[in-house]
Amino acid sequence: MTASFLAALLLCAAPAAAYETFSLPNGLSVLLAPDRSVPVVALAWAVPVGSRQEPKGLSGFAHLFEHLMFQGSRHVPRGRFDKILEGLGAENNASTHQDHTAYYESLPAHALAAAFWLDADRLAFLDLTERSLRNQVDVVKEERRQSVENEPYAPLLAVGIASSVFSNWSNAHDGYGSFADLDAARLSDARAFFAAHNAPRGLRQAVVGDFYPAAARRLAERYLSWIPNAVPAPAAQDASEPPQTEERRFAVSDPLASLPAVALVWTGLPVRGSREAAAAALLGRYLGHGDASRLRQVLVKDAQVASAVDQPEGGLGFPTSDEDEYRAPGTFGFFVLRRPEAAVEKVRGLVLAEVASLARDGVPPAALARVKAALAGDAVRERQTALGRAQTLVRSWVLDGDPEAAQAWLETLMTITPEETRSAAAEYLTPGRLNLFDLSAGGAP
């Protein structure tokens, strides 16, 4: 893999080069990146609240409001939001993460004003009543049942790992929300949470596609600038964790699982955006990402002690080395479906032997080049559309304070050396930072 090839991929992965940013009087920040090549425009915006910002007693509120934002507002009755956008030929969705909630609309260029108006109405006049709250609490509880409680391995991956490896409630609690907290949710709590965390001052919005910047700026000013910040900003959440110095082990069971499993999870990752974090991300991709990963080769093909190896993506309850989705702290880990006849200690020993090899020699240069090329290719595919570019820009903006951070991160990844991967493995993937989860299938002890 030549340096010139990677440089060409980096150029293709770069987000829209020409853009402008401005802030409205209420603090809402807007990025405009015109691209007249296709008559489509994407509006992506992010709210700086995720599961980590929820106070005790209000677990699941960030996710709950992702649902409530589609349930109607003063001028858009319940059920009309999606129908209006569908009638315009648009698509829309949202997602909740550890440190932000993301929303988007992708629509024909002529309908941009409608998207601004719809978003303004739900930000300013959300239909937050006892009826809508109770309705969506029931929806979220059912989603949890389907996605966590009735899905094999999900109780561990979505809830159990974070609650075990973290001691700070902000990081450890269930992002779906406990049933007790959801059932006890009061309308006054919901209104106060929305006013504090969904205020304009923290919102970041990226508009990418076929529009004239002056016209789009007028739309933003007309529809968004008057929305007030109703209450003071909440205090910053303390997400710090004490360092882990000894290996910890957890035995769990899963009545729905058909095969036993082992999760190996390291805590204490380096600071987001640093070269050490980039080296750790490359280690994760090399070891556990995809069918060609090193651990799949060792555990599944060679030793035949496992049937699958995965590096889980970040979700509501499991912060991982999926570094795009959250700030910190996170974890670095792998999930292994173990063959019943293979001992847990055998799996652990093989994984730690690979880690020790990396701490001694680093990722081999040829393999490192392949991993880099795959990451650059992923970035190119993500940013081929107006929506992908808008989401990349706004995610970097809300998490890092800089729309260009994702591109800078990618460029950092491309310059990491094998020696830097060796150093990261030696410092961060130590036995003292390891948490091992031994999952028994079928409810066995």
Image (tube, rainbow, N blue to C red):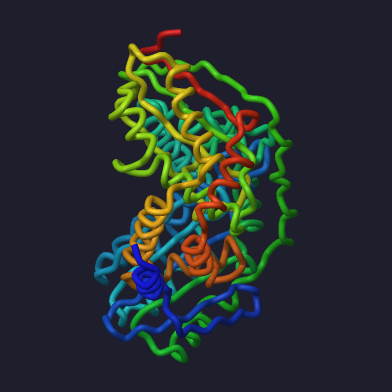
> Is residue 287 found left or right of 303 in the rendered image?
right
Is residue 71 shown to the viewer in this render? no
> Is residue 170 found left or right of 381 in the rendered image?
right
Taking the view exactly as shown, the residue that stands out farthest to the top is 445
- Across and down, in percent, residue 340 comes to 33, 14
Classify 332 as above or below 378.
Answer: above
Seen at 71% across and 61% down, the residue is: 231
> Toward the viewer: 17 or 280?
280
Is residue 306 shown to the viewer in this render? yes
> Toward the viewer: 49 or 118?
49
- Quarter containing the N terminus: bottom left
Q: Quadrant of residue 248?
A: top right
Seen at 39% across and 35% down, the residue is: 295
Classify 439 as above or below 292.
Answer: above
Seen at 64% across and 45% down, the residue is: 189
> Toward the viewer: 351 or 255?
351
Q: Quadrant of residue 374?
A: bottom left
Report the number of discs: 0
> Toward the viewer: 396 or 197?
396
Q: Quadrant of residue 166?
A: top right
- Across and down, in percent, residue 150 comes to 36, 26
Seen at 24% across and 69% down, the residue is: 89
Classify 2 as above or below 433.
Answer: below
- Across and down, in percent, residue 13 comes to 39, 70
- Across and down, in percent, residue 119 comes to 46, 68
